[in-house]
Image: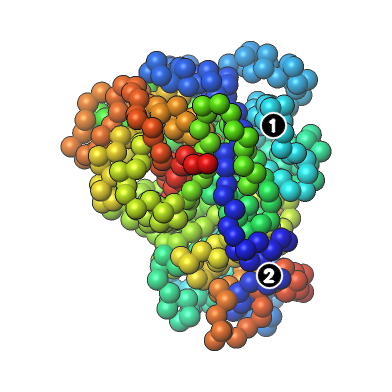
Amino acid sequence: MMVSKKIPKVYVSDMALITPLGFSVRQNMEMLKSGVGTIQRYQNIDLLPEPFYASGISELWLERLCQPFGLSGDFTKFEKMVLLMFETIRSSTQIPLASKSTLVLLATAKGNISLLDPENKDTMDVERASLWHTAGMLQEYGELSNRPSIVCNACISGLLAIVMGKRLIEIGRYENVLVIGAEVLSKFVLSGFMALQAMSPLPCKPFDIDRQGLSPGEAAGAMLITRREPPLSTGAKTICISGGASSHDAHHISAPSRTGEGLVNAIKQAILEAGLNDINLLGFISAHGTGTVFNDAMEAFALKRLNLIEIPVHSLKGFWGHTFGAAGLIEAIVSVEALAMDLILPTCGFEQASHDVDLRISKSVGYGKSLLNCLKIASGFGGCNAAVIFSCHKT
Amino acid sequence: MKITESFGTILAYKVIKNGKIWHNGTLSFGLTESESLERLLIEGYYHLELNYPRYFKMDTLCKLGLLAASGLIGEEYQSYDPTERCILIANRSASNYTDSKYYATIQNKNGYFPSPSLFVYTLPSILIGELSIRYDVRGEGAFFVSDSFDIPFMYDCWTCFGLRKSSMICLLGWIDVNLENQYEAFLVLLKVPHRDVHGLDCSVGNLQELYYGL
């Protein structure tokens, strides 16, 4: 292990994204600006007995994107998405992903869970359903020196992986960390949230007075973070991760603390680490905003406790649903891009303010003036929370 | 931040396997034969005086984790603020044991009755959630899945937590139950470096000795 006297800065180097909205970071940003979401009505008895609202990625488009990399049909949808994200970064970055100085962190809640379904005897494959199998597959595929580690921490997995990756670089263990997050729609997850009565009967409406639950989605993303200072490109902002933390509510395993205690602590720690003396230096907040009554109320309460109610807040889940283990990562990717573009994104699905949500929810797209920082937050089952602050790097 | 060969102190540790429970290397409980995991989880609960009725609502993985944590948490632990307490756990099988039980409730042919009480346990990090509720842990935490207990990696993660002023004491370990009912639990109580602390240095080597020792 290296001995380092000074804590290195951690920069965001390359990113990749595939969602039902778009097949690259750029395409996603264009579509997000338009404010139109992709959550639609599905009727598929292999997934759920009754019709439901969700957002999925077209298999056809995925195949087309995989073709240039030779990713064939032998891989499951989940595996294809993971490998596609890896390949996209590999083909665009100078950073050596296979070297000993790079660690890959894979964030997911359920991975290849469908392969554990005893009703589908043809595809059932216990070993391949294991998350460590996906890690091994990725290592082999990328000829990586280090076995990827898997962050399996419910809905904060994607954001938590960024926090852990940043710290592993700071302690001098690695120079670079590639965070990949992926989640696919499955009968397993859909039936579960239906049983919990947490599914919205219509496309989810984050923070809205009429919100009635979440809409599941699927997506994958990748964020390469590094201690190497990125080369200066004309005009583009360099973004670094200035603060990050996780926490627990210690309250309930499937409902957030009413006082938002845990989330408050995580955000406080992130702000402290970022050295943000004036919270008005936050350009926007990308909330977890699932569209459930409890989550959105808790988040709003937590942000109010921290005097953050004047900062524009948005949730991206109305665009492509709740992507569970991948959510924190893909939404962080969008946050970084939005920060770089001085963009205030709208909250698709939000129409009318609610008495229990006293926040500045951005309804339409807007532009800020030289945004310096943004906050990304996430919460999950088990009462876990994560918060990350991205900041513009001044040269 | 300076990386040294060891970081912090191992205050205590628990091992559960083959029907037996060891505390700091001493056998504290064992079934007469290598009986079922279910038997161990019930008898262990009473023998170790867990005194926590919520235990019986939990799934197998969480029960195993709670059993492993009992006895590690004492006065030392309670002397820290809840936000200074953290948890780092990894395993190989994620929540597959309960995933499989949940799948049995969503079989289209044999009766479709998705169980919400089982579904909430189909995430391995719920174990951290249950531990956090039991021991009022409000600090940081993370759950990892790997094919075997990656001690160097978990040690790195502990260093990441412990080097921050906000974390002081940590439950770290490997808690696993697989589809063949095979189980294993290894849990250590770690404390950040402090001149008054006596115990085993927390190093990769010492963790490996404790883990592979029994």
Q: Residue at x 41, y 48 (%)?
A: A254
Q: Residue at x 72, y 74 (%)?
A: B206
Q: Label 2 vs label 1: CA separation? A: 32 Å
Q: Are marks 2 and 1 on the same chain?
A: no
Q: Residue at x 71, y 37 (%)?
A: A95
Quadrant for residue A80, please give it. Answer: top right
The residue that mark 1 highlights is A93
Residue type at mark 2 is Thr
Residue B5 in the image, given as x and y percentages of width and height: 71, 71
The residue that mark 2 highlights is B4
Residue type at mark 1 is Thr
Name the side, left or right, on which B93 lies relative to A251.
right
Name the side, left or right, on which A203 lies relative to A75.
left
Residue A227 in the image, given as x and y percentages of width and height: 63, 47
Front residue (pair A382, B117) = A382
Q: Could you tell me which quadrant the C terminus of chain B lies in?
A: bottom right
